Amino acid sequence: MSRTIVGTLFLAACLFVSARAEPPGKHPTPCEIAYPSDRTIEWDCRTLKRGESLEALFGEQWIKVARFNRIDRRHARADMSLKVPKRIEDLAAFAPLPLFYEPAERDEQFVLIDLSEQFLGAYEYGALRFALPIASGNGHNETPTGEFRLTAAHRKHESCLYRIEGTNRPYPMNYALRFYVNKEGVSYWIHGRDLPGYPASHGCIGLYDEPMQQEQYKQPKDPELTDAKRLFEWVLGGETDEDKVIPLKPGPRVHIIGTAPMSER
């Protein structure tokens, strides 16, 4: 999330961002996080060995396995335990969000975020257009729930509090969509970030942005997952080269429901 300064309402909104918000101590693995939709897929827990990768283990299906675990390739490393479906083909029908959401049936565009599932859905007149895994607030810094509306978009937003680890570079919040400002002036955004396989933000909603990770961390070598960009361009109706804040009047409605899951350890 980020703090808004009066007079520079959007551009200065870059404090308290969700860049490095993991709670202290050992982080949970995807196997230790329970989602309601887990019961729809039979899976086993597998610990990755040194040198193993999602691509090497699952071939063309690696993206589906990554989405099922709500994790990115940078965090799917040795000693990480992942949920591996007993039948990879079952992931073709994996649907953690409703295919039709009645409260959105009159909306040309509508965003549903289910914290219990750690998934976001983009709806058009109630029908699910696409669904994306997220990283939300983690219980220490919770994501607000309720009914909101997207009010601003910023393609090259960034944090002025958090840095890329080991550098002085501000943490990027690419393809940011603002959905809420609280009474204290703290703004919450949907934006690109890391997906470590568990709720890890200060309250913002994070989506895959592998090009940012490749630029900042030099991995993955060949970025493919660009969910933040996909949602951003869906909201705006296409690509934009503008680096300034774009007001959305009115932007799509957003419903945030559920409670972020906690580790089962």
Image: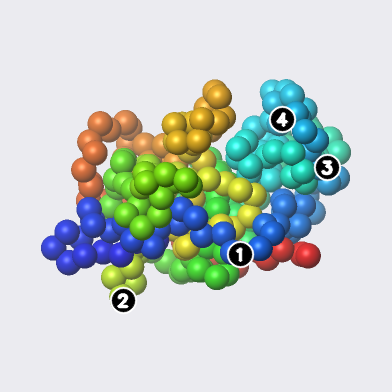
Camera-nearest label, 3 or 2: 3
The residue sitting at the left extreme is 7
Residue bearing the label numbered 3: 46
Q: Earlier in the sequence, mark 1 or mark 3?
A: 1
Camera-nearest label, 2 or 1: 1
Density class for disc 1 (Cα within 10 Å; few <14, some 14-19, many ≥20) is few
Per the rendering, the mark at residue 183 is: 2
One can see residue 161 in this view: yes
Residue type at tag 4: Ser
Q: Quadrant of residue 172?
A: top left
Residue 85 lies left or right of residue 30; in this view the side is right
Residue bearing the label numbered 4: 53
Residue 44 lies left or right of residue 8; in this view the side is right
Residue bearing the label numbered 1: 24
The image position of residue 244, as x and y in percent, is 21, 43
Residue type at tag 2: Lys
Cα separation between marks 3 and 4: 12 Å
Q: Secondary structure at mark 3?
A: strand
> Would you place residue 102 above or below residue 93 in this image?
below
Q: Earlier in the sequence, mark 4 or mark 2?
A: 4
Cα separation between marks 4 and 2: 45 Å
Q: Earlier in the sequence, mark 3 or mark 4?
A: 3
